[in-house]
Image: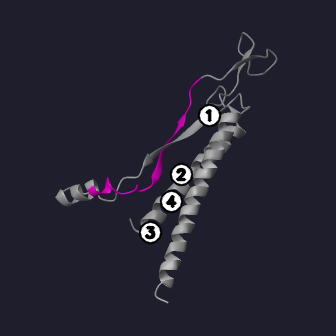
Amino acid sequence: MSMFMGIDAAASGLAAERLRMDVISNNIANANTTRTREGGAYHRRYVVFKPRDSKADHAGFEAFLQKSANNLKPGNGVRAIRIETDDSQGPLVYDPGHPDANTEGYVERPNVNIVAEMVDMITASRAYEANATTINATKSMAAKAMDIGN
């Protein structure tokens, strides 16, 4: 695995974790939203990640060998494939004076758990930091390799 492949894999992690933090921030911002454009309370969203495929997607025996060799190497990075919505129902709170109350007087609250969202935010932040550290370490190794001849 070349240094540039390592930087590329870490950069894909940076982009993916940034998107994840944006989605989590949106969930936290809408933790009290009981009315959306789609109707009903806000439902939390989450990002689905997938490992990036290798660059060898060609047909033929050489591509097969390359793909097999990639199984023994570190990953090629990650990418976000979609943002999903958690369709589970949020808690029902009895508040007959609320404008979004149903006929029985209950209001559906968003299914956002602030504690869980903050834990997700911390893990996304740590993963972002780890990827940034990887890029900085790779840059440092490249700089030290340039100094070997001097």
Q: Mark 2 points at which residue?
A: 16
Mark 2–mark 1 CB contact (< 8 Å): no
Q: Name the residue under label 1.
A: 44
Q: Does the magenta stretch include residue 79?
A: yes
Tag 2, which secondary structure? helix
Q: Give the range drawn in magenta.
A: 69-88
Q: How is the image coloured?
A: one colour
In space, the residues marked 3 and 2 are separated at their CA atoms by 18 Å
What crowding class fits label 4: few (fewer than 14 Cα within 10 Å), some (14-19), or many (20 or more)? many
Q: Name the residue under label 4.
A: 10
What crowding class fits label 1: few (fewer than 14 Cα within 10 Å), some (14-19), or many (20 or more)? many
The structure residue drawn at horizontal position 71% and vertical position 28%, both measured from the top left corner, is: 34
In space, the residues marked 1 and 4 are separated at their CA atoms by 27 Å
In space, the residues marked 2 and 4 are separated at their CA atoms by 10 Å
The structure residue drawn at horizontal position 22% and vertical position 57%, both measured from the top left corner, is: 65
Q: Mark 3 points at which residue?
A: 4
Depicted 128 relative to depicted 49: above or below: below
Which residue ends up furthest to the left in the rendered image?
Answer: 61
Counting residues from the N terminus, which is met first, the one under dot 3 or under dot 2?
Answer: 3
Tag 4, which secondary structure? helix
Give the camera-side residue of 133 and 52.
133
